Amino acid sequence: MEVIKLTLFTRDTFSSNLSKLQDFQQKDAKALGMSKITMTRMFILDSSQGEAVELDPGLVTTVHVLQGHSNSSTGATPPLGEGDLRNGRYNNQNVLIEYKHYPEPQQATSNPEIVRDRVQFLSKLLGVECRNGEPTGSNNFTLHCLGFFHEPEESRYGLAFALPQDREPEPMSLHTAIGSLTRQSRPTLGQRFAIAHSIGYSLIEWFLVGWVHKSINSKNILFFRQERQGLDFDSPYLCGFEYARPSGGISNDALKSKGLDWDIYRHPARRGFPTETFGKIHDIYAFGVLLLELGLWQLAPQLFGPTAKPTPSVIQETLVKNARERLGHFMGQNYRDAVLLCLESSLAAELDDKRDSRLIAAFKEKVVAILEEGRKL
């Protein structure tokens, strides 16, 4: 019920509810299931609130592509931007750069103004007020966006993110951690539940402002190393917002196959010629794949042979089979059941409203709340 109340303040009704939300903001945000960061983002849903910060691209330099985020062995800029994350500097400050590529004008099949407007709005949502570079809400797990910039000669926009304080500048993705960390360096059982809960909570808050992420996967979960210590598993960060957009909005992105590493997170209805418009249920499916990897501590593509080219239905069947037969041993029955709800898309309500209020409520109650309980282990 808490989530349903919160989703009353969505994009289509927001302007008429600004005064109500100002009163609403005085209440205990945590008790209502929403952080202060998200409440601020809800103000920004009114286009008259806040300004996007446009950065000088001449002050931006990139260092290298983060491991697992390049489509090229040379680290060159990929032709299509999913997963294009780079360490860099802006105005002599260490930052993380995320690029959104778009077709060149002679190849464009989408409206360039939509791309720019979406990047501007995204930079506003991800750039809500922070204290000393850290989110003011303790339950927020996205980096603070300093602003956006445009590089027309490269046919791309960029978002620059401040790095967490007192952390080494180069992060490690969950994907890399699963594939490389020794047993002694891996997160504990309780930490794995905490990571899962943090990302699930962040996803709920993204849903509450009426957006979908569209690229939930283990390469887009980052950890930073504490100075002279190990990775900080208590503070995972969700990134990879290149394809993020308002739920139900127009999508300008081609659904090209990028290989099993990326396609395995796509709901079967979103593969090939999609039979459904991308919605929250598809983000939840991808989250289920992420939870499976985190629980088994095994990358999902490794469930298939090195030369396998499984169909979308076979991929889903294999993921569900491994969750049902193996996950309970590693993470317990409740975690297993939560993952199955995501992978089988069992949370969707037949009679939901256009804000997917029942879906969000079910996701919170039957998945995220279960993950929160596991943090005590």
Image (cartoon, grey):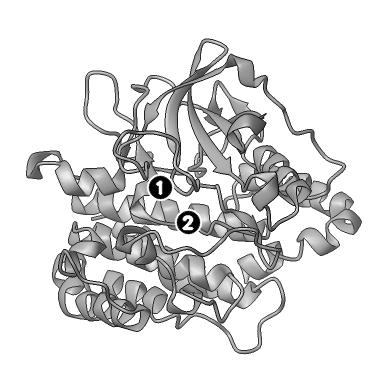
Q: Position of residue 45 (x, y in %)?
A: 77, 50
Please name the residue shown 43% across and 46% down the image. 83
Please name the residue shown 58% across and 55% down the image. 205
Q: Amino acid at mark 2?
A: Ser
Label 2–label 1 contact, CB within 8 A: yes
First in residue order: circle 2 vs circle 1? 2
Q: Position of residue 243 (x, y in %)?
A: 57, 53
Seen as rendered, the residue at the extreme left is 183
Q: Amino acid at mark 1?
A: Asn
Please name the residue shown 24% across and 63% down the image. 301
Q: CA distance from mark 2 to mark 1?
A: 8 Å
User: Is 36 placed left or right of 167 in the picture?
Assistant: right
Disc number placed over residue 220 in the picture, else none: 1
Please name the residue shown 54% across and 24% down the image. 133
141 versus 190 height, above or below: above
User: Is 95 placed left or right of 221 in the picture?
Assistant: right
In the picture, the quarter occupied by the N terminus is bottom right
Q: Is residue 366 visible?
A: yes
Q: Position of residue 121 (x, y in %)?
A: 72, 44
Q: Is residue 33 visible?
A: no
User: Is 208 placed left or right of 330 in the picture?
Assistant: right
Q: Position of residue 132 (x, y in %)?
A: 55, 20
In the picture, the quarter occupied by the C terminus is bottom left
Seen as rendered, the residue at the extreme right is 16
**Between 79 and 228, the one nearer to me in the picture:** 79
Crowding at mark 2 (Cα within 10 Å: few <14, some 14-19, many 20+): many
213 versus 279 height, above or below: above
**Between 65 and 229, the one nearer to me in the picture:** 65
Disc number placed over residue 215 in the picture, else none: 2
